[in-house]
């Protein structure tokens, strides 16, 4: 496994693979890897002979009062996990290499990035689309894999790729969960013991709403109320619970096609997100 810290270094490695006819899969991450990330590596391997994982806590997607400084980091552990999963190259972009001191160019997606987390975290998706654009230009993958836990992010990236004609296929892989249902996330490590015990309420609420859907409920207000009640009862502070179209992310007052039931909530100082696909 190659460990690369320079942009030209990873470009040279990928160029060598391509000359030999290899297809390149790419998994962009912010590090502190877990089984959810490693499952994305497995998905990338299904259609690629080489897999690159980038590890970079991107400052431009964090707001002024968000958890950039608290975000967990452990590169040595990450490299061991990547090696165990057969990753071919780990790429550590450095901030100076990605963002010049007078950086002034941004990539904006102006539709799917507006609701849900875009409303709660102004500027977040501008940072995401910009850094993903830069990473795609550097690595030039054939396939890039994102997780369904960050469903809005994946849809925004897919739209960006379509609109700007990137020659990359974006795959959205299923959520990987802890045994108690909590969606795997690097931020889970920021939870206190008590908060960690309560956080699975996100999935319990979504599961209860999905059961109501299976029983015939189609009204968004009723389905969202189920999630809100379960999360609130567990001591979570709800940011949003919304049923939205899976294609447009516009609110769906009534479930009549493919939708996402999405939730964001705070447990202590840690904001967690989760979702289920319905319809």
Image: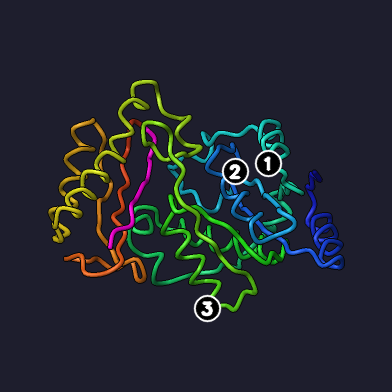
Give the alpha-carbon distance from disc 3 to disc 2, as whole Å: 29 Å
Residue lying furthest top: 193
Residue 223 lies, in percent from the top left, at: 17, 52
The stretch in magenta equals 269-279
Number of residues whose C-alpha sits closer than 10 Å to that of mark 3, classed few (under 14), some (14–19) or many (20 or more): few
SS type, badge 3: helix
SS type, badge 2: helix
Residue toward you, 32 or 35 = 35
Which residue is depicted at the point 19% across and 51% down?
A: 224
According to the picture, the residue beneath numbered tag 1 turns out to be: 85
Give the quadrant of the N terminus: top right
Q: Residue 38 has which mark?
A: 2
Residue 67 lies, in percent from the top left, at: 47, 39
According to the picture, the residue beneath numbered tag 3 turns out to be: 163
Q: Earlier in the sequence, mark 3 or mark 2?
A: 2
Residue 205 placement: quadrant: top left
Check if mark 2's residue and mark 1's residue have beta carbons within 8 Å. yes
């Amino acid at each position: 496994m190659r460990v690369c810290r320079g942009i030209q270094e990873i470009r040279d490695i990928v160029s060598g693979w391509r000359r030999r006819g290899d297809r390149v899969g790419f998994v962009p991450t912010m590090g502190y890897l877990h089984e959810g990330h490693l499952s994305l590596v497995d998905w990338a391997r299904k259609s690629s002979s080489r897999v690159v994982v980038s590890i970079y806590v991107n400052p431009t997607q964090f707001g002024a009062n968000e958890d950039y400084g608290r975000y967990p980091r452990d590169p040595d552990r990450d490299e061991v996990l990547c090696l165990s999963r057969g990753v071919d190259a780990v790429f550590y972009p450095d901030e100076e290499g990605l963002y010049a001191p007078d950086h002034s160019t941004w990539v904006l997606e102006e539709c799917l990035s507006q609701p849900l987390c875009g409303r709660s975290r102004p500027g977040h998706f501008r940072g995401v689309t910009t850094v993903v654009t830069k990473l795609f230009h550097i690595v030039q993958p054939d396939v890039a894999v994102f997780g369904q836990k960050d469903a809005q992010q994946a849809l925004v990236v897919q739209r960006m790729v379509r609109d700007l004609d990137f020659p990359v296929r974006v795959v959205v892989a299923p959520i990987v969960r802890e045994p108690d249902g909590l969606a795997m996330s690097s931020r889970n490590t920021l939870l206190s013991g008590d908060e960690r015990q309560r956080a699975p309420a996100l999935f319990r609420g979504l599961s209860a709403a999905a059961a109501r859907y299976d029983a015939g409920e189609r009204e968004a207000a009723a389905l969202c109320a189920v999630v809100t009640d379960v999360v609130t009862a567990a001591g979570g502070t709800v940011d949003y619970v919304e049923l939205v179209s899976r294609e447009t992310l516009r609110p769906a007052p009534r479930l009549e096609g493919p939708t996402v039931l999405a939730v964001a909530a705070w447990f202590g100082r840690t904001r967690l997100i989760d979702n289920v696909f319905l319809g």
